[in-house]
Image: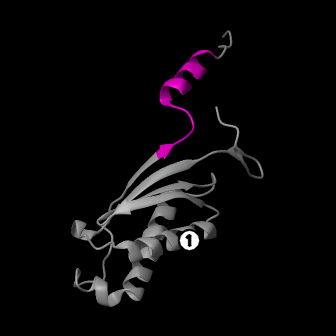
Amino acid sequence: MQDSYERGFRSVYSLTAHAVFVTKYRRKVINSTISRRLKEIFTETGQKWNCKLQEFNGESDHVHLLISYPPQVQLSKLIANLKNVSSRLIRKESAEYIDQFYRSPVFWTGSYFVASCGGVTIEQLKKYVEQQSSPNI
């Protein structure tokens, strides 16, 4: 399995999620400057949630985030916060540029993609569970 687990008060864990945020109407609004700033915003916001941005990349109309997080963090609330904070700051700091693409105060679509990921495949987990001893009942 994996040997780099995080330790909490009553838990040992390794939780990682892959998230994708898409710009409203898939407008190609993300340039290199905005991409760098988004990475900074996601890193800073994640730290406030005791989360770590492991990887960040994207294209002109969407971004990919690989986030590690502790078990007490509700992933949907973390993602909502990441989207809200980044949208607000990008629109504030790059208002003149963003206004070329949107008339209303938007940046991301209302939806997102998220998938859990880890150090082992589903097949490896199934095999591990199958090999466990069953209690005689």
Image-based side of 74 in relation to 96, left or right? right
Residue plotted at (52% across, 73% down): 40
Specify the segment rendered in magenta: 116-131
**Image spot of residue 84 (x, y percent):** 43, 74
x, y percent for residue 108: 33, 70
Binning the other alpha carbons within 10 Å of mark 1 as few (below 14), some (14 to 19) or many (20 upward) gives: some
Residue at the outermost front position: 32
Residue 63: in sight, yes or no? no
Per the image, the residue denoted by label 1 is 45
Residue 1 at what x, y percent from top left? 64, 31
Q: Nearer the viewer, residue 36 or 2?
A: 36
Image vertical order of residue 59 relative to residue 85, above or below: above
Q: Residue at x 46, y 72 (%)?
A: 36
Left or right: residue 36 compared with residue 13:
left
Label 1 sits on a secondary structure element that is: helix
Asked if residue 93 lies left or right of residue 54, the reply is: left
Of residues 59 and 124, the one nearer the viewer is 59
Q: Among all residues in the image, which is located at the extreme top?
A: 136
The residue lying furthest to the bottom in this view is: 96
User: How was this image coloured?
Assistant: one colour
Q: Determine if the magenta segment contains residue 126.
A: yes
- In the displayed structure, 45 sits above or below 100; it is above
111 inside magenta stretch: no
Q: Quadrant of the C terminus?
A: top right
The reply, left or right, for residue 12 in relation to residue 35 is right
Residue 70 seen in the figure:
yes
Quarter of the image where one finds residue 112: bottom left
Query: Mark 1 belongs to which amino acid?
Result: Thr
Q: How many marks?
A: 1
> Is 100 rendered above or below residue 86?
below
Q: Residue at 58% x, 72% y: name it.
A: 44
Picture coordinates of residue 103 (x, y %)? Answer: 22, 85
